[in-house]
Amino acid sequence: MKKILIILFISSIYTQVMTDLSFRTSQSIAMAGSVVSDPGIAESVFYNPANLSNIDNSEILYGMTDFYGLNFIGYTYFSYAFSTSFGNFGIGYQKLVTNPTSGSQANLSSESSLSLSQGFDLLRDNNSTLQLGYTINYMMLNQGQTAGVSGDGSDGMPSTSINALGIDVGIISSLRNKVQFGVYLKNINAPSLGRGSSYHYLPRKMTIGITYRPFNDLNTNISFERLLGKKDIQFRFGFEYKLSHNLTLRSGIQMKPNRIGFGFKYMPFENINFSYGLLLHHIMPSTNNFELGVSF
């Protein structure tokens, strides 16, 4: 029974684009996805581009995620947030590869996304802020050649590549640097992949979150996420506590399904940090993330 559930779960991953994953970066994994109202600057490309308007220093983020201990799924991501005279921007890249045979050069499938984001202020005064941001995602899906009836690929279907363009929009507002409110709408332009019998729209979702800072070293986040057209709502709660100048602790929970996250960010130097995130699952093995960040 467990093997059947795992196969069904893996199949659901392969039938959706990787950019629909709610848990990508170390911060999101450790805090169970409750970051829409307060993502890190470089993470804003993936979770709420409005936060890019708060750039103080340029940041680079690179990470790898091991989903559910499945060694044939490889996921890597990169983001770069920077400020120019034309505004504050972010660039992101993600790639998810499925390779069932260790060392094989032929992938069963690969999904990648190249993102361009911008965040800017609508209002900023001594007591409050209001920011708006957008992300343009160019998504590519490559399917490998099928084995066919013979099993050696001689009579299988050839490899194919399809792509789509998605647009995301985010809003963040804050009051006295104590309360922060965030909204993120993904794929608002209803992008689609395929044609004919394989034609389908990519998932659209809305995430709403609130961050409360009782004091400077502690952030508490609550968020709600819903796939548009579905009734189920995922509730998430997370916190981030700065234990010392070098070490920040993170944790979070999600309901429907129930999941628990843990993690930390360690800064051996002022402009370099290492992060780790762990997310438990009620059926599957845990998800692990390792991340390197640099600011300058």
Image (tube, grey):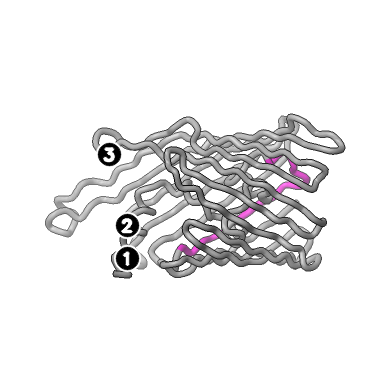
Residue 209 percent coordinates (x, y):
63, 46
Residue 78 percent coordinates (x, y):
57, 51
Labels 3 & 2 near each other (Cβ < 8 A): no
Let me know if residue 10 is in the magenta part.
no
Looking at marks 1 and 3 on the same chain, the residue that comes earlier in the sequence is marked by 1
Task: Please tell me the numbered disc located at residue 106.
Answer: 2
Q: Residue furthest left?
A: 150
Q: Nearer the viewer, mark 1 or mark 2?
A: 1
Task: Please tell me the numbered disc located at residue 251.
Answer: none
Magenta stretch, residue numbers = 51-67
- Quick one: SS at disc 2? loop
Labels 1 & 2 near each other (Cβ < 8 A): yes
Q: Amino acid at mark 1?
A: Thr
| Of 200 and 208, the residue lying toward us | 208
Q: Amino acid at mark 2?
A: Ala
Query: In this figure, which residue is indicated by the disc labeled 1?
Result: 101
Q: Is residue 131 above or below residue 271?
A: above
Disc 2 crowd rating (10 Å Cα; few below 14, some 14-19, many 20+) is: few
Q: Is residue 24 above or below residue 264?
A: above
Q: Measure how far apart labels 1 and 2 are at the Cα level.
A: 9 Å
| Of 8 and 167, the residue lying toward us | 8
Q: Measure how far apart labels 1 and 3 are at the Cα level.
A: 26 Å
Query: In this figure, which residue is indicated by the disc labeled 3?
Result: 198
Q: Residue furthest front?
A: 231
